[in-house]
Amino acid sequence: MAHTAPAPNARASLSAADAARAQSLRGMKRLATSLLLIAALVFTVSFALQDQYPWLGYVRAAAEGAMVGAIADWFAVTALFRYPLGLRIPHTAIIPNRKDEIGASLGEFVETNFLSDEVVLGKLESLDIAGKLGGWLHEPANARRFGAEAAVAAQGVLTLLSDDDVKDLLEKLATRHLFEPEWSPAIGRVGEQLVAAGQQGPAVEALLAKAEEWLRQHPEAFSQAVSERLPRWIPGFVDRFVDDKAYREVLGLVQAVQSDPRHPIRLAIDDYLADLAASLQHDPAMIARVEGIKLELLESPRVREFAGEAWASVKESLAASLADPESELRRGLESAVVETGARLLADPGLAAKVNSWVADAAAYLVRTYRHEIAGVITETVERWDPSETTEKIELMVGRDLQFIRINGTVVGALAGLSIYALATGIHALLA
């Protein structure tokens, strides 16, 4: 009548905790069975000697009741997990035969009683998520750990990303956001604002300074350029005089424009830039010309090459920064994490918002995926082998169920003794 022990290969696959439960279960089974055997032995002896010693009738009755209680409860406990003595009695081996129904009921129970909005939100309201998170993030060691884990995750993402896909994405983004809109009006509006604010001044100054520098460093090149445009019949001394005169005049003009903010040439440049900005916005011919330049650029293979080069550079830089614990990126991330933790601890308003966000997110997830979450339990139990399911459940609750056998033995003994004593007393009174 003792339970069949799990097969050796099943025990070998048990975890350490399950192995300890199995050993404890075997001990309780031996104890319950030993009480039954003791009751049977006591019954045998008392039954054989009760004619010589009438008081042994009470002992026999107690032992008889103990055996009845022990056997009945053994049958009840065994019927949960397997067929008693291998006999296919109806409504026995309940767990292996109704495994799927038990899994469905368990999933429904969890869904109804543990994944309800009231239970989840009530638990979240009792927890200061923002405070606990802020305290954890505020610790530098935790911030470093968070940064390290985030870096590993980011490196994994970089590894999974396809370079060709990223290049295609960059090219599409560039086409959509840079090439689809008209360039000319936008450039014209920006130019108009810059000219109106006088922002072209530094650029003009830089060009004048560069022109003066070039003239001073290359007088021969300037003279040669002038001489090449003079008639060949002009004498050499006249040629040199003209070259020198032209050089001094041009250099003086550049210096005069530099020194006078209201010089006519400066004003002419400003007017030209203003007219150019207006043309870029309103002149159809200018707009069409700029659009043509844009289309030529769009069709150029340099666009995809640029996208590939940009992604390769960014990817290499990111990978190096993520791998280096002392990089500015990692240190910046850790600093941001610590600062976030400090803000969560110091700002009750922010903490309240975070707690509200967490509660709303949890409520949404529970409300939307409650059935799917509970379904995991049902599907998991359905995938279990019946014998495996029986073993798992028996290991979890079997030890406590053996107390039913023990209690049944004790209660049966008391009931048998009480019934025998009452019957004997009534018989004595009637006699």
Image (tube, rainbow, N blue to C red):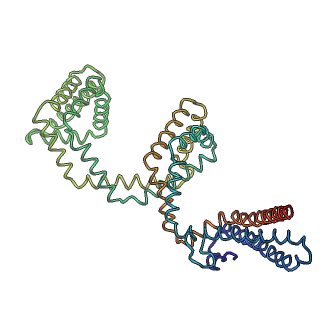
Taking depth in this image into account, of 245 and 367 the one nearest to the observer is 367
Quadrant of the snapshot with the C terminus = bottom right
Coordinates of residue 102 in the picture (x, y in percent): 53, 62
| Residue 41, picture quadrant | bottom right
Q: How many marks?
A: 0
Residue shown at 53% from the left, 52% from the top: 110
Q: Position of residue 249 (x, y in %)?
A: 22, 28
- Going by the image, does 37 lie left or right of 9? right
* 421 relative position to 375: left or right: right
Residue in the foreground of this view, choosing between 195 and 299: 299
Q: Quadrant where the N terminus lies?
A: bottom right
Residue drawn at the location 53% of the way across and 57% of the way down = 106
User: Which residue is most to the top?
Assistant: 262
Residue placed at 22% from the left, 39% from the top? 222
Q: Tell me if 34 is positioned left or right of 306 in this view.
A: right
Front residue of this view, candidates 13 and 297: 13
**Position in image of residue 216 (x %, y %):** 30, 36
Picture quadrant of residue 248: top left
In the rendered image, the residue lying farthest to the right is: 53
Q: Position of residue 300 (x, y in %)?
A: 21, 53
Rendered image quadrant of residue 120: top right
Q: Residue at x 52, y 51 (%)?
A: 150
Above-or-below relation of 156 to 234: below
